[in-house]
Amino acid sequence: MLGKTAGGIFWMFRYLERSENTARLVDAGFRLALTRSTAAEKEWESVVVTAGVRDGYLARHETFEASTVIDYLLRDRTNPSSVLSVISGARDNGRLVRTALTREVWEAVNECWLTLSDALSRPVRDRDLPAVLAAIRQQSALVRGALHGTMLRNEIFNFARLGTFLERADNTARILDVKYYVLLPSLSLVGSSLDNVQWETILRSVSAHQAFRWVTKGEPTPRAIAHFLILDQRVPRSLAFCCAKVSGNLGYLEADYGHRPQSHTMADACYHRFDNRAIDEIFDDGLHEFLAGFIADNQALGAQIERDYRFHE
């Protein structure tokens, strides 16, 4: 496969995952702001920080008001990570690799772009926000369903999955990191009812609240939730699950191409950092340090995959 085709597939699905993750972040911010109306601006700032666009946001806005943050994250074309920007990027990449996609996948990508371009053609009112966020999540899921239902399990499929899970892992790590170090206004609130409500909101932001209840049958304590979203390989948005999928898909590429570039070794090392790890050990060593290191390593892995498979050639 040409590197440009592999890169187009990789980034198409990375952008689609990012659109869904951004919608989940906005939803989490909306819920958290409702629980702390007196500190709503701080909550929205944490959402911007989580999305990794704080500098770009402050270049255009001075305060973190809800309507401004929502518009910047969903509609602002100057924000390369806004939903409008990334769905356009996903469609552009889809057009570039059109012949590598089934008709169903291409039609789902195009429908995603048409639907969300229309939904985001005007500022989103508060009463319409839940429906718009649901549409963003649904459109991403439809493309993913078309991929799973119609594509061969070949190198094209593997590059699509690599883009999906690298992006998803980055998002989960950022949500956990910002929650622990930005959302809490005071250490005195750790373990309080307010703290627990915020942690429950984080579970909802990654669609894991009900699954957590099924598995743990207990109170959503910070350590239990962190274990669930970092170490539990049954959770499709946990760090361990995402790293297992990245390592596995690179392994399929190794079998297809008969060689093992540096990114494969990096991916295996990332995955094995979760072997026999206890959440107490991670907390004792520093949750922030663990997550910051993971985010950096995940970004380095993505860049190495681009080099190894010559996306820009």
Image (cartoon, rainbow, N blue to C red):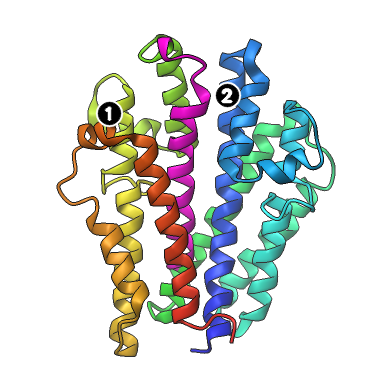
- Secondary structure state at the residue bearing disc 2: helix
Residue 176 magenta: yes
Q: Nearer the viewer, residue 175 or 135?
A: 175
Closer mark to the observer between disc 2 and disc 1: 1
Which numbered circle lies on residue 30?
Answer: none
Q: Identify the residue at image location x=64%, y=73%.
A: 94
Earlier residue among tags 2 and 1: 2
Q: Where's residue 44, x and y in %?
A: 65, 28
Q: Which residue is mark 2?
A: 31
Q: Which residue is mark 1?
A: 224
Q: Nearer the viewer, residue 254 or 300?
A: 300
Q: Identify the residue at image location x=47%, y=14%.
A: 186
Q: In the rendered structure, which segment of residues is drawn in magenta?
A: 161-188
Q: Where's residue 299, x and y in %?
A: 47, 59
Q: Where's residue 247, x and y in %?
A: 31, 66
Classed neighbour count for the residue bearing mark 2: other residues with Cα under 10 Å, few (<14), some (14–19), many (≥20): some
- Secondary structure state at the residue bearing disc 1: helix
Q: Residue type at mark 1? A: Ala
Q: Identify the residue at image location x=64%, y=45%.
A: 135
Kindly tell me whether residue 291 is visible in this rendering: yes
Q: Residue type at mark 2? A: Arg
- Residue 242 to residue 286: above or below: below
Number of labels in the image equals 2
